[in-house]
Every structure is written in C-alpha cells, then in structure tokens.
Image: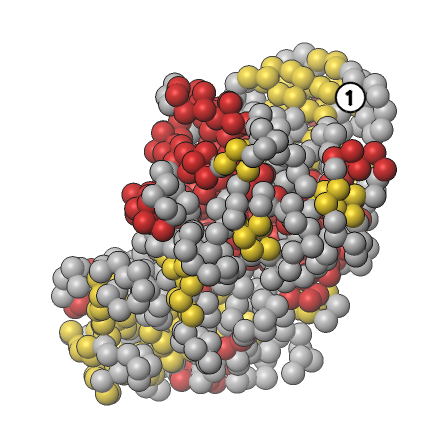
Amino acid sequence: MDYAGLIGRSDIVLARPNLEPSQAMPLGNGRLGVAVWSANGLTAQLNRVDTLPDRLPVARIVVPGLASLTGSSDYSGRLDLYNAEFHEHGAGMSAKIYVDSSRDNLIIDVTGANPSKMQQATLSLAPSRAPKAETDGNTAMLSETWVDDKQPGASGRSFGSLAAVTADGRDVQVSVTDPHTVSISFRPYPDGHFRILIAGPHFNAEAGPAATVAQQSLRKIAHDEAVAVAEHRKEWHEFWQHAGYMKIASPDGAGEYMENLRALYLYSAAAQSRSEYPGSQAGVADMFSSVPTHNWDPGAFWHWNLRMQVAANLSTGVPELNTPYFNLYRENLSNIQEWTRKHMNGLPGICVPETMRFNGQGIEYETWNAAASIVALNCDAGYKPYYNARTISTGAEVSLWIWQQYLATRDRAFLVRNFPVLAESARFLLAYEKPGSDRLNHTGPSNAHETQWDMQDPTTDLSARMALYAATIQAAQALGTEASLVQQLESALVLIPSLPRTQAGVAKTLLPASADAEGNDVIAPSYLPSAENHNVENIGLEPVWPYDLIGDTSPLFELARRTYLHRPYPVNQDWSYDPIQAARLGLRDEVRSTLIKLTEKYQTFINGLANWGGATGEFYVEQQAIVAAALNEALVQDYDGVIRINPAFPREWDVDGQVFVRGRTKVDVNLANGAVQRVAIEAGSTGPVKVRNPWAGNSRTGPAVAVIDEGHAARKLAGPMLEFSAVAGRRYLLVPAGQTDRSVHATNASANPALTGTPAATAKKLGPVQIGVFADSK
C-alpha cells in the first residue's frame, strides 16, 4: 500500500497564493487548530476547543517577511495531507507550516531567506479582548483568563487562552507593541534558514504563570529539528495507515472528487477531535476558523450536526476520534439528569437536549443575530413551541451511537463506562409514554426534531423508542445488569405504535398501515402529517438511518424507498442525509447524484469545507462527513450483523476501498465496471462471519464462492448468504469458485495488486466548485 501516494491524491494544490481568510488552509493536532493564509506574507489564526463558552481565538500571527515568497510569480503551495503540513515555495524560498502532532505548537519552518535581512512577526488579539502582554527572555506572549459566569446556564468554570512566540534564529529580540500585540524580530541563520515557534497550549487561571506554561510548551520543540519533524510525521502516518482507504476512478472525475472530500474529512477529523469536547459545533469547523467570532452558540452542540461525523469515524475505522463526543454526554450525565428533573416535570432519567451547552444545560444562547440575542430552552416542558423545545429523541440517538461504537470495537470497558447513558435515556422515554385508548403507549407533545413541533407520536420518537429499547436490552444483557429495566423495556417494545403513513405528494392526511398494499403511501413525520413544517428535514427517513429500523429485508423496505423518492426536501442544506439514506436503500444512482449536487451547491471553499445554506461565511465540516459516511455505506454495510458488499456504489465509479464493520473487522473491496472483482475480510475478532454473496445479484441461489484463508485450504460456499468461522487476525479472500486456483496462488504469495497513487499535481474542479487554486484563478 503506497499510503503517501494514495493520500497525496487528495492534497490541496495552490497555483496562486491563498490571500483571503476564506481561502485558509486547515492545520491541527486535535487540540490546537490553525487557519493559514497568505495575507501580509503569512497570516495564521490559532484556535482551541477549550476557550469556552465563545470559543475565542487563541491569537493571530502575521509574518510579513514571507511576502517575497507568497508574492512571487513562481509561487506554489500544497496542503500535504499525509504529513499534515502546508508547504509554500517561491522566489527561492520555502516554508513548511504545521501543528506538531503531539505538542500544541505551530511551527513555521523557512529556508532560502536572505540571511542579512531582519525578519519580524507579530502576535495579536482583537481590541475587544483583554490579554496580558509580556515577554520572558526570547519569548513574547499574550494570555487571558475568564470565568464562564455571564451567559445563561453558565458553568462557573475558568477558561483562558495563551499564545507565545519565539524564534530559532540569530539576534532574537521580543517586545510588547501595545496591550493587544507582541512582536519578535530576528535574523535567519547564514544558510537562510529560520523557524518561528508559536505555542498555543491549554491555559486557564489554574494553569500557573503564563510564562511558565509557555516555556514548558516551547521547550518541548527545542530539541533536534529533524527528530521533531520525524515524530510529527510518524504519528500522522500511523493514523493514515489504520484508517480505511478509498481510491476511486470515474469517467467524469466526480468519483475522484468525492475521494478527495472523504480524505479531507479524515484529515479534518483527526485535526479537530482530540480534546475534551468535539472540535465542531453546529457542523462548523471551529478549529480551522479564520474569523474572530462564531455563528450559532459556540458553547453548545447541535446533535443533528455531529452524528454524521460519528458515523464516518466508525465506518472508516477511527473510532478513537469519537472520544470527545461520548465524553460530552457521559461526563454531563448528572447535569442532564438534574436538567430533566427541573425542566421535564420531575421525570426520571435523561432528556438529552438536542442543542446542549458543554456543561449539560439545555440552553441555546445566540448573540450573532444582529436583531436580538436568542435564548431558547431544549428539553423543557414549559417552554413555548420551538425548534428543539421538546425534541426528546436525542438521548436515544446518543445511546445508539454508544451501542454502535461497542459493536464496532468490542470494547467492554467502553460499554461499562457509557451504559448509564443508555439506561437513563430509556428510563426517561418509558416515563414519557402514556397509554392510549388503543392500548398502545404514545408520546407527546414532542417534536419531530426541528420540523414539526409538539406532535403526537412523531416518527423520531417512535424510531427512538423502537431502536433504543432493543439496544438497551442487548447492552444490559451483555453486561449482566439492570434486569428490572430489561423487563420493562421488553414489555414496552410491543406497545409502540407503528410508523405513521401519509400520501406521497401534496395531500397530507393520515393513512392506515394497510395503505402499503396500494404502493402510494410514504412515512409521515408524525401522526399529524399536515402540521406546519419549520425546518427542511426529511423526518420520514429517520427509521432508515440513523435508527437502522428498515433494511433490505424489512417488509417496510419499499415503503421507505417511496419515502425517499418523495421526500419533501431533496438535497437541502449541507448536512442533508440524502446520500447516506440513499445508500441504505440501495439507490446507487441517487447516491451519485446527491453527492454531486450537495457538493456543487455547498462546498464553496477551496479548502474542501462547505458553506451552510444560510451563507454565513464560516467553514463547515459536516458536508465532508456526509460524503465520507455515504461512500462507506455505499461500498459496505453491516447494520444488522450481515456484511453487504457493494449495496449502492455508483456503477460508473471504480473503487479500491476499505470499510470497517462490527468486531474490529475490515472489508477490502475492489469494484470495476460496476462489478465486484475482489473481496478480502480481515477478521478483527474470532467468530462467525455472515456475508451477502457479492456475486449473487438478484439470484435466489447465488454462484459458488471460494473462501480462502491464508495458509489453509479453500472452503467452497454457495447460496445468497455466505457464513464461515473466522479467526481474529486472519485474512479471508472471497472469489467466485472458478477463480480458486489463481486466487490461492496470489494469496499465498501475499500479492494483492499493489495499490498506488500519485500526489495531486493541480487543483480539482467539480462543476462550479473546486479544491485548491488553479493558475488562472482570480
């Protein structure tokens, strides 16, 4: 596997400098994120998650001495994903810019500078900030601390920011320019080389003196430069080599463009998701922000805009990147319980707020609206009807992702730590149910997410109860706990109403389940289909994904397909789940068309990040995650313990790809000309493996398939479903039985065709959007 070449296919190439903040290149190590662009030579904004509640920038650094590089006629730039470095060249100079993978420092490494010319850099904060500007030896710094005690739902916690700059060069001098700015000047070494080192570590009032914290951070990069670079690259190389790969070829280049967005998502996820809380809120790529303030409530998290990222991380084999997500809800469990008791009429368990502050409060506080600030309550029985005032399904969703993470990793300790979230979410929904005259249990008033407000039995509630009760039963039994709760859930499962139906098209009246036989009905968002819609969500498809209630063996499968084809809001907003839900429904042409349409409509930034439908100007990471999750689902699915190969991958796209399924198992697939060529299953655990015959097509029998275990005799299986026992750590090749002799030879020779790639040479274009900058770009 040529990982450097393969990942390099998705590098961002600049034939002209990225002069605008909207063209910034993203860098990060999961704790410190940076946006870099070429204004004034070089400008970079440092960002962290832990500058709450407003996610204030750590600082900006400006290096005017690089203007000769970025302003040169022979300029070239590249965001090197494999090494997580931004490289620039021009006028005989080169700059390598990166955030050290293990230390929270930005490094600007320059060669080819004029050794006699004094270089400068300024570190600054906005005039609205109140930092302490100081120097310590050859280091200048800006530090600020504050307490979260002013906004609604304040935590009382201490937060802060610290940025410190020094240089590896000659004649280093530092100074305080003004209360918001510090400066450094120096000369390059005689060979024209210098480094500017900017620390951006965690900092608050309890961290100690700013100078001490800064020196501790900078001291860690004062050792041999080559060793530091090697250590940084080693961590990123290991990340890429354990993440699932994908290489796509297509006649029109659209497949390659989606491959690039998938790789960029993985890069973004690793660069933003290693802190206490998720790096993104409301789908915004906050860690790579190039603006001083954020839209939405920077201290709160919208679950709807996190779940596609959780899904993409799981199926790509990087579940460790979900750690901040699970921490957000697990560590706030007691706070959410208290919120539920106070705001949901004393009910037990947890009503997890759909929009939840980092400290577990169901408060959405927005100040970016020029007209007025917004303070909205979530999971609140007394609040006015509003977007998420009574969205009560979020706890079930969080719990189901806990269960999916466990199925993927088989990490029992993880399940033990997080099981209370499942149990308390289930307890709340049990308490919220009320028996009706039909002898079934109903919920209401509650929201069909943000789309319909205060309905009876919204489809989100029904899906949440069906999926959560079943998962909680399985989890409790796996852990040998909560026997009484299990009994309650088993009894409640059979008392959940069926999903509501309505007509496809304009008419919106409630239909009985018997309408399925006529083939003209769809899943409604609630039992009042005609209710006003307040958002553009396709609620009828929630049972398909993420709740996994309707698969290709379900009697509701055709109903779900009709629901998709008649969904009210196709390709609407950068977070649209159309491609993922199309993949689950086996609609490969829809997977292709919606991926392309969403990208052409919303991926408006040259760094591959998207612009939300409201055109806010901030970078959004959620559309990349939709692409990654959808491509994985289209190539391999395993939502019910059965591995499906190529359920919905676009026919026009050839692919070599790897998707992770349950039990730490990897599935490698090669498709060419719309047909499966090779399948290899790398078992992550010992036990039975069930695979839908990749060559069965619509056949009820399916051709015979040879299952080849390295060093062992081939087993011949037949039928539409293949089942065999696997041993953890072994690799199993699946081929049509007629190819057995040739495949056995290839397998024993450890000779899968080599997968190689060539790093991108130019920017890429898809319709009106592009990744990178072409030579003739304005």
* Image quarter of residue 572: bottom right
* Lateral position of residue 729 relative to residue 512, left or right: left
* Image quarter of residue 769: bottom right
Q: Residue, x 78% and y 16% (percent of image)?
A: 718
Mark 1: which secondary structure?
loop
Nearer to me, 453 or 639: 453
Local crowd size for mark 1, using a 10 Å CA cut-off: few (<14), some (14–19), many (≥20): some
Residue 403 position in % (x across, y down): 48, 33
The quadrant of the picture occupied by the C terminus is bottom right
Residue 445, visible in the rendered structure = yes
Answer above or below: position of 693 versus 394.
above
Residue 256, visible in the rendered structure = no
* Lateral position of residue 146 relative to residue 39, left or right: left
Q: Residue, x 79% and y 43% (percent of image)?
A: 521
* Image quarter of residue 140: bottom left
The quadrant of the picture occupied by the N terminus is top right
Q: Which residue lies most toward the front here? A: 437
Per the image, the residue denoted by label 1 is: 720
Coloring scheme used:
secondary structure
Residue 482 position in % (x across, y down): 37, 23
Residue 10 position in % (x across, y down): 61, 57
Answer above or below: position of 671 versus 590.
above
Answer above or below: position of 559 versus 750.
below
Residue 414 position in % (x across, y down): 38, 33
At label 1, the amino acid type is Pro
